[in-house]
Image: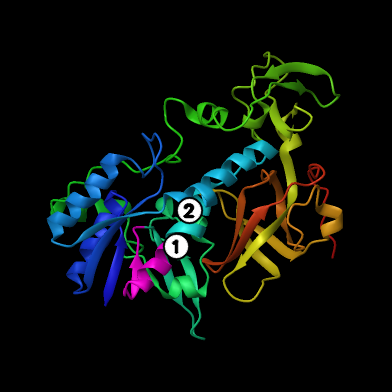
Amino acid sequence: MKVLVAMSGGVDSSVAAARLIAAGHEVVGVTMKLWGGESDTGCCSVSDVDDARRVAQQRGIPHHVWNFGDEFDARVVEPYVDAHRRGDTPNPCIECNRHLKFDRLLHRAEAVGFDVVATGHHARVVALADGSLRLGRGRDAAKDQSYVLYVLGQAELARTLFPVGDMTKAEVRAEAEAMGLRTADKPDSQDVCFITSTGGRHAFLGRRIELRPGRIVDETGRDVGEVDAVELVTVGQRRGLGLAGGGGPRYAVEVDVPGATVRVGPASDLLSDTVVIDQLVWAGEPVAGRVGAQCSAHGELRPATVAPSDADAAVDDGGGGDGGVVVRFDEPHRRVAAGQSVVLYADGLVVGGGIARRTRGATPAGVSQFTD
């Protein structure tokens, strides 16, 4: 089988390529050049490209660099900026998977004659009895990446391999070391590739949108402080608000960018038992009923029930329009920020997911928007 391996310059994709070579496949490595600006984190630095090329040389396979910079800017960077402009909390890594790694790359690979694409993600493709496919969690629970891959449908899963999905991270590193790969001890990439560790979000967004100071008010509407840039405040944030001590910790519970206002309150004000999600992606038929819901990349899987939403009651300002679904959690927990993904699981497999919609206000703990 002719396999194109997406090589990010990390240890996982290096071992993925080596395993496929050992299995007898015709393997070619490719590194996607996505971000052309300043980068000292993530997976788009010059050193990452060099590491990928050197590993390919070590294993005796061709290596190419494909430039998808324009698509990355349009599909990932600009939506990231727009989300902050609205006061939402985007997940650019998921959008990169959706539009670049498992759309643009897959189509280019098919066009030039590859059978499948392989990556170093910690996830698995599982075939069901009826022949359909599902995305499964990686064997290493601490490194599982199924959350950020929920956007893969049947067509994508059928043309994708995850060679390290059945390995722990320790096993990946041990195998890389045994083969003498230069990436064996390389630290994992943790950050958004276009946000530098020195300038952070403030510097990046400040060059693209006007960052405005905002008021901080308490639950009564009384002014209690100020923020330098309301666009950078995230629901659930505690640090960086500059609030005076005393009275217990307070968190950002609502962010009103047009009104340049952040409302703060105790942790209990963040509790909610529901979230409305839209921009839905289903692995098969749409799901209703009992699921497990995961609300962040390494978040806990929470028991929940899924049902169609009442769009008119839930939507604030044009948050999707497709009706979406309501996810009702068995127990209230910290509210999901608008713009974040909620991924739905059944029996350890991804059945669907979507993006949390901005609503007219928080659902108080123990009070449900869900109707039977």
Q: Position of residue 313 (x, y in %)?
A: 86, 54
Q: Quadrant of the C terminus?
A: bottom right
94 on left or right of 5: right
Residue 113: in magenta span: yes
Mark found first going from the N terminus, 2 or 1: 2
Amino acid bearing label 2? Glu
Q: Which residue is mark 2?
A: 71
Residue extending farthest to the front is 70
151 on left or right of 364: left
Q: Are marks 2 and 1 in contact (CB under 8 Å)?
A: yes
Residue 62: in magenta span: no
Render colour scheme: rainbow
Residue depicted at 19% across the width and 61% down the height: 62
Q: Quadrant of the N terminus?
A: bottom left
Q: Position of residue 336 (x, y in %)?
A: 67, 45
Residue depicted at 71% across the width and 64% down the height: 306
Residue depicted at 56% across the width and 44% down the height: 78
The kind of secondary structure element at disc 1 is helix
Q: Is residue 318 visible?
A: yes
Q: Position of residue 124 (x, y in %)?
A: 41, 67
Image quarter of residue 127: bottom left
Local crowd size for mark 2, using a 10 Å CA cut-off: few (<14), some (14–19), many (≥20): some
Q: Is residue 171 visible?
A: no
In the image, which residues are magenta? 105-120
In the image, is residue 275 above or below residue 103? above
Image quarter of residue 82: top right
Amino acid bearing label 1? Arg
Q: Nearer the viewer, residue 306 or 358?
A: 358
Q: Which residue is mark 1?
A: 104
Local crowd size for mark 1, using a 10 Å CA cut-off: few (<14), some (14–19), many (≥20): some
